Amino acid sequence: MGRKKEDILDLNQSIIDNFGEHIYSQSSDVSTDIEVPKFFDKPMKSGIGFVDYVLGDVGFYPTQSTILTGDPGCGKTTLTLQIADGLRGRGVNVAFASCEMRKEMVTRFQKRLGAEHPIDIITDKWVELPNGKRVNVPFATSVPHLIETANRLRAKNPNQPFMLIVDSLQELDDGYFKSGRKTSRTSYRSMDALNEWAKETECGLLVIGQVTKAGQMAGSNDIKHLIDAHIHVSIETKDEDLRGARILEATKNRFAGCGQIVFMRIGEKGFTELARISDTSL
């Protein structure tokens, strides 16, 4: 894990004047001298064929930050809970931060989907202190508290891969304003902090994001450049034979490329695959 923030200095002219030669001697690395971490050879497959297919047939890499967007009512939470169950069944520790639903509703979702594996559900809640007082702790919606909670959960099994799933980005507060006020940059700062956490801890990150009425990712356009992968779920409205079907595709994937498209049906037990194509063959 990276150095503590209090140990990191801002690079200013005074530091360059005093340590410039030492600093710039570390500015580049010879490619043949760079050791590739072993975890990059062990991506976290969900075991859900069409999800892994859309992600280049490899699944989620450690350090990978992924946003899942979709049309309203397309089943984003359903899909992420299916992914959570699939990952957990393949030995990945999964924490699901629910910023919008109570823990009981998440559990109800899991039971309806027939989830076979337990996951850690993080929600904001009232906590009773040893002195009898109660305090409201935003474990899920406050980014600093969410990161601390995720670190404590993954520390229980430090040798196992870990995936944090967040529902959803627009509900997060990065703590920039002590009043809790949010602006158009709040989502970006929240995603930036979580992305940095994923890189430092070698964990996977999957965040649900909202879309605008025009179907574009809500929030700063800078978010698109920040993340490693973007997968999107849309609802088919034009083709009569596939009307109502869900279309899953990756519009960005730094680690494995994109171009794979899957048509899905959503039912009581979640998503099932109808067909898959590659847009490179169109």
Image: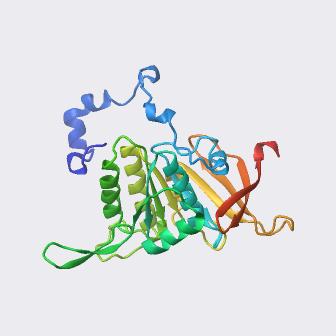
Choose between 112 and 52: the one closer to the eye: 112
Which residue ends up furthest to the left in the rendered image?
Answer: 131
Horizontal side of 193 relative to 55 (left or right) equals: left
Is residue 270 in view? yes
Which residue ends up furthest to the right in the rendered image?
Answer: 240
Is residue 210 in view? no
The quadrant holding residue 109 is bottom right
Horizontal side of 144 relative to 202 (left or right) equals: left
Q: Which scheme is used to colour this image of the protein?
A: rainbow
x, y (%) of residue 33?
Answer: 41, 21
Quarter that holds the N terminus: top left
Choose between 271 and 218: the one closer to the eye: 271
Residue at (49% x, 69% y) in the render: 106
Q: Is residue 22 above or below residue 163?
A: above
x, y (%) of residue 203?
Answer: 42, 47
Count of residue discs: 0
Choose between 180 and 167: the one closer to the eye: 167
x, y (%) of residue 143?
Answer: 36, 63
Q: Is residue 49 above or below residue 263?
A: above
Residue at (56% x, 48% y) in the render: 46
